[in-house]
Structure formats: structure tokens, C-alpha cells
């Protein structure tokens, strides 16, 4: 069966890379001090980035813009679903603190997603590290809705009466269609990354291929079907290389 590629997959790749790069706290430091940074970083572009070819930089910038467009599309659609759910009379059908909690989560998401949608990366911050943090910020906001949706769509966990109301209302206002479309578009994006990388590989000169030796070798293995990955899965791996955080 084809492995599902979702925005969650891309989010986890970014998150795992960030966690791996974060400094570990000393015994005298509190865990509360190790919060995930938001927005943009203040670090200068890394040496590795400054050594990149113009073609590689253009590839990263183009795919970054397309990824942000994908995130914004999902943020906009989920924002509308959340607003429609909140306006539905069924969300006040139970008078309880738990039902109020359901509404509060969605109310916060409407506010946070609106803010995330209006966020724009400054032109003078368009380097590799800042692109990473900017995408992470939008990713984490969107995951608040996706996680809320997944929890209430669960077929293994027992839902509370309030969660059942939320789930029925989510379905009524397009949550299932949203999830299906998000999975399809995420898979398409993974495949698109591979297509764009193919163009990049073909554009490299002999000397540039030598500088990108490791990537060329991986690409060669993929084209020879030696990696045991389908196109979308390989796109995920390329995504990890193109959108990385340098500590």
C-alpha cells in the first residue's frame, strides 16, 4: 500500500531536525528554558549555504515559496472550517466545561491561524535558517487544527460526548474533504520536489556535480531504483535536505 504523505510528515521532518540541533540543557538549566524559537532567527547564513551554487539556492527558494503557499492554503481552509464549526448551534448543545474547552481550542486556532496567514518573511531574512523557522511557525499552528481533527476522528480512542459533538460538526463542515485534499496535495508536493530536483541535476556542470557529489550519488541511486522509495517518499528525503536548520 502506498505510504500516506501528509503535511504532518513534512512537519515532523522539520521538528526532528530542530530538536537534534537544539542545545541540551545543563543540570542547572530548567527545561522551561528550552522553548522552540518562532519567527526568524538572528543567525547569519551558514558557511555551507554561502558555498551553495546559484542553482541550488534558486531551487530552495522556489520550493520554499511553493511550500508556504501550500501551508497558507491549508491554514485558510482550516480557519474557515473552524469558524463554521464554532458558528454551528450543535457546539452549544451540551452545557459543560468540556464543551467550552472544545470551543476554546477552536477559537484560539481561528485567532492563531489568522495571524499565521498574515505572516510574511522579510526580504532581508530570506536565508536558509530563517526560511526554516518561518515554515516551522506556520507548521506548528496548522498542526493544532490537524491534531484536534485527528483526535476526534480516532476509531481506537474512546471519545467524550463533547468530542463526539465536535467530530460530527467537523464532518458536517468539510473536515473529511479537507483531510483528503491535504493528503493528496502533500503527496503531489513531494513528487514535485523530485521533478524540480531532476531539473536541477540536469542543469549542473561537471564541476558543480563534483561539489554536489553526495546528492548526485543519492540521485543516481534513486533513478536506478536502489533506494526502495517511491517518488513521494524520496521527495520527503529531499525536503529534509533542502529545508534544514544549521546550528
Image (cartoon, rainbow, N blue to C red):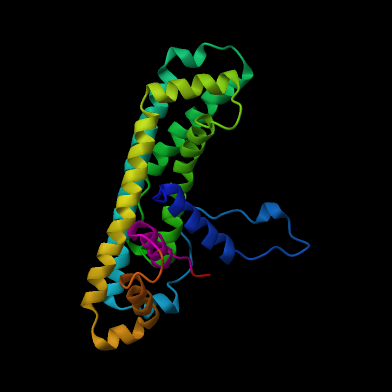
Residue 60 in the figure: left or right of residue 92: left
Report which quarter residue 62 is drawn in: bottom left
Q: Residue at x 35, y 57 (%)?
A: 232
Tell me residue 37's x, y (percent). Answer: 54, 55
Is 220 placed above or below 88 here?
Answer: below
Residue 13 in the figure: left or right of residue 99: left
Report which quarter residue 169 is drawn in: top left
Tell me residue 149's x, y (percent). Answer: 48, 33
Predominant SS of the magenta segment:
helix
Count of numbered tags? 0
Q: Residue at x 42, y 55 (%)?
A: 134
Queried whether the magenta region covers residue 183, the answer comes back as no
Q: Which residues are magenta?
A: 229-245
Question: Which one is nearer the viewer's eye here, 51 or 208?
Answer: 208
Q: Residue at x 31, y 53 (%)?
A: 189
Queried whether the magenta region covers residue 244, the answer comes back as yes
Tell me residue 49's x, y (percent). Answer: 39, 75
Question: Which one is nearer the viewer's eye here, 239 or 123?
Answer: 239
Question: Which one is nearer the viewer's eye here, 128 or 228?
Answer: 228
Tell me residue 235's x, y (percent). Answer: 36, 61
Is 160 placed above or below 47 here?
Answer: above
Amino acid at each position: 500500500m502506498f505510504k500516506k504523505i501528509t503535511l504532518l510528515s513534512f512537519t515532523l521532518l522539520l521538528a526532528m531536525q530542530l530538536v537534534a540541533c537544539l542545545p541540551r540543557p545543563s543540570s542547572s538549566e530548567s527545561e522551561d528554558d528550552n522553548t522552540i524559537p518562532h519567527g526568524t532567527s538572528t543567525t547569519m547564513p551558514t558557511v555551507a549555504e554561502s558555498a551553495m551554487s546559484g542553482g541550488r539556492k534558486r531551487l530552495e527558494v522556489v520550493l520554499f515559496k511553493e511550500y508556504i503557499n501550500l501551508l497558507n492554503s491549508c491554514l485558510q481552509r482550516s480557519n474557515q472550517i473552524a469558524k463554521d464549526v464554532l458558528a454551528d448551534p450543535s457546539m452549544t448543545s451540551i452545557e459543560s466545561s468540556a464543551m467550552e474547552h472544545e470551543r476554546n481550542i477552536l477559537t484560539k486556532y481561528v485567532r492563531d491561524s489568522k495571524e499565521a496567514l498574515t505572516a510574511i518573511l522579510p526580504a532581508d531574512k530570506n536565508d536558509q535558517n530563517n526560511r526554516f523557522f518561518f515554515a516551522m511557525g506556520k507548521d506548528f499552528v496548522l498542526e493544532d487544527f490537524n491534531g484536534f481533527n485527528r483526535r476526534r476522528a480516532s476509531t481506537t480512542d474512546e471519545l467524550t460526548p463533547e468530542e463526539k459533538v465536535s467530530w460530527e460538526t467537523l464532518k458536517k463542515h468539510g473536515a473529511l474533504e479537507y483531510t483528503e485534499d491535504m493528503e493528496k496535495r502533500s503527496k503531489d508536493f513531494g513528487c514535485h520536489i523530485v521533478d524540480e530536483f531532476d531539473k536541477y541535476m540536469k542543469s549542473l556542470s561537471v564541476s558543480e556535480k563534483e561539489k554536489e557529489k553526495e546528492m548526485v550519488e543519492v540521485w543516481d541511486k534513486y533513478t536506478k531504483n536502489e533506494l526502495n522509495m517511491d517518488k513521494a517518499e524520496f521527495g520527503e528525503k529531499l525536503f529534509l535536505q533542502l529545508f534544514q536548520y544549521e546550528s
